[in-house]
Amino acid sequence: MATASASFKSREDHRKQLELEEARKAGLAPAEVDEDGKEINPHIPQYMSSAPWYLNAERPSLKHQRKWKSDPNYSKSWYDRGAKIYQADRYRKGACENCGAMTHDKKACMERPRKLGAKWTNMHIAPDEKIESFELDYDGKRDRWNGYDASTYSRVIEQYEARDEARRKYLKEEQLKKLEEKNNKKADEDGGSDDDDVDDYLKVDEAKVDESKQMDFAKVEKRVRTTGGGSTGTVRNLRIREDTAKYLLNLDVNSAYYDPKTRSMREDPLPDSDPNEKFYEGDNQNRLGGQALEFKQLNIHAWEAFEKGQDIHMQAAPSQAELLFKNYKVLKDKLKNSTKDTIMEKYGNAASEEALPRELLLGQSEREVEYDRAGRIIRGQETSLPRSKYEEDVYINNHTTVWGSWWRDHHWGYKCCKQTIRNSYCTGSAGIEAAEAATELLKANMARKEAAEDKPVQHEEKQLVTWGTEVPDDLVLDKKLLAEALKKEEERKKEERDERKRKYNVKWDDEVTVEDMEAYRMKKIHHDDPMKDFLH
């Protein structure tokens, strides 16, 4: 321990000082004492125990570590609740109109509103309240327990104890009533044995014993310090007397090691016993399962990810490491499931209840065949072609060939009878001859019918003129004249739409040619025509 003075010391004095400090830390020498006579802890570091040079401390002390700047106006006192200072005999001007106190007005009065206030009755003047003001610091203003009297909590404890006492008394009475009813019965309806009567008698005896003595078998009386000045409390031991300690499970010297300092036994003390009967299997059992195993896997994942170049650290950012580990497990499960589905889709699942496809069952064999480098068979049977999933070589309705063995005119059939109906009965060669004869007869009948039929008379169609009359044989329309007639017809219709363009002196040609008539008909609007709105 460094002293207050920082004077020069020789090598021998410095060595003695170090030995003294070591002896004080080991408890071989008495601790150093400060100015007030209090012992200084020898384990306090030197930078904390040594005082600054500007304080000029002559003796070792820890005053420089304490708060030396104190506010003279600050006090830990609190409001005197319910204190009164003065009670007047008459109403005073400016006092409360309801109760007559000078410390508040009518709006802030906490008394019941009187029918006639003290201002008018001048009677029952309430005393003035004691008003105090404190200058609290930052923590004092925000201390929710400031001014709390800890002794008031004893009322809460008394209420809970009274409730528990009443509950224990009620349960004890109910139990005694039930047991007395059983004992008063002369004969049991179910034919109970003498053992049951003995058990009931023992239960009655246990119920008659004071319940507090039964429950407090592990009670330890201990002095507990409280804010109210200290009281005797009860601290219960959580271990039951019937429990066997770990080190007593196996008394063999070479059994599992028990560490008395940490009270731990990692290995199983009884490894050869029945696991169904064992209550304790060693502390390693807890470390290999549950959240301990998850935390171990999380650490391993963080180490491996950091080695692969990922910015992750378990101690610096545990939330980030846990989130990345969760994402890693989700992606791993997805990849595992996709791989599993791909393999099952390709090869099937032998563990499932569904039957395997027949192409897989029939497409493989255990026959040994030896091949050379070119793929030719050297020894063994020839490779057999895999069968299809459909049944083969099944003959129905007396057929000697399968359906689809014959083809004609875009129809499948049976080769044995050349029939194209699937469910037909086989007729053999007689059916083939009858079918050929029927076909030849049908062809002959069709040829005879074509020869006997008369050709229909073709009627000449009359060409009609566009305006509805019969067209003469020598009628020919000139395309140029028809184009000119169409232009004239358009100009005429424009003049009809706008009368202002019509000239005063107009000469009309009364001669109408065939082209003019055709142009008029083409430009004419047919009111019955459904497409008239789309013309022109």
Image (cartoon, helix red, strand yellow):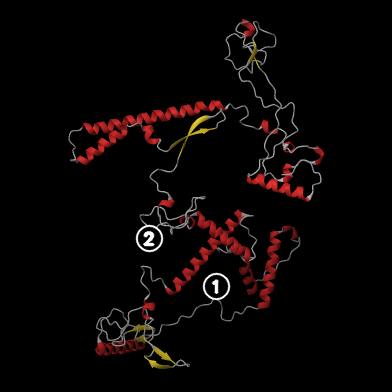
Along the viewing direction, whichever of 58 and 115 lies nearer the viewer: 58
CA gap, disc 2 and disc 1: 125 Å
Crowd class of label 1 (few under 14; some 14 to 19; many from 20; radius 10 Å) = few
Q: Amino acid at mark 2?
A: Asp
Horizontal side of 12 relative to 409 (left or right) equals right
Quadrant location of residue 495? bottom right
Which quadrant is home to the C terminus?
A: bottom right
Of residues 3 and 164, which is closer to you in this image?
3
Per the image, label 2 sits on a secondary structure element best described as loop
Instruction: Measuring from the top left, give residue 76's x and y in whole percent.
Output: 67, 27
Report if residue 430 is visible in the image.
Answer: yes
Q: Measured from the top left, where is residue 227 in percent x and y?
A: 57, 30
Q: Which residue shows up at 70% across the image and 22% down it?
A: 133
Q: Is residue 229 above or below residue 427?
A: above
Please name the amino acid that badge 1 sits on: Thr
**Label 2 vs label 1, nearer the camera:** 2
Q: Which of the 4 image quadrants contains residue 113?
A: top right
The picture places residue 17, in percent across and down from the top left corner, at 73, 46
Foreground of the two, 472 or 191: 191
According to the image, label 1 marks what residue? Answer: 469
Residue occupied by mark 2 = 272
* Callout count: 2
Is 189 above or below relative to 333? Answer: above
Label 1: which secondary element: loop
Q: Examine the rendered structure and indicate whether residue 48 appears above or below residue 485.
A: above
Extreme residue toward the front, this view: 12
Q: Residue at x 39, y 93 (%)?
A: 379
* Corner quadrant of residue 324: bottom right
Q: Is residue 443 above or below residue 215?
A: below
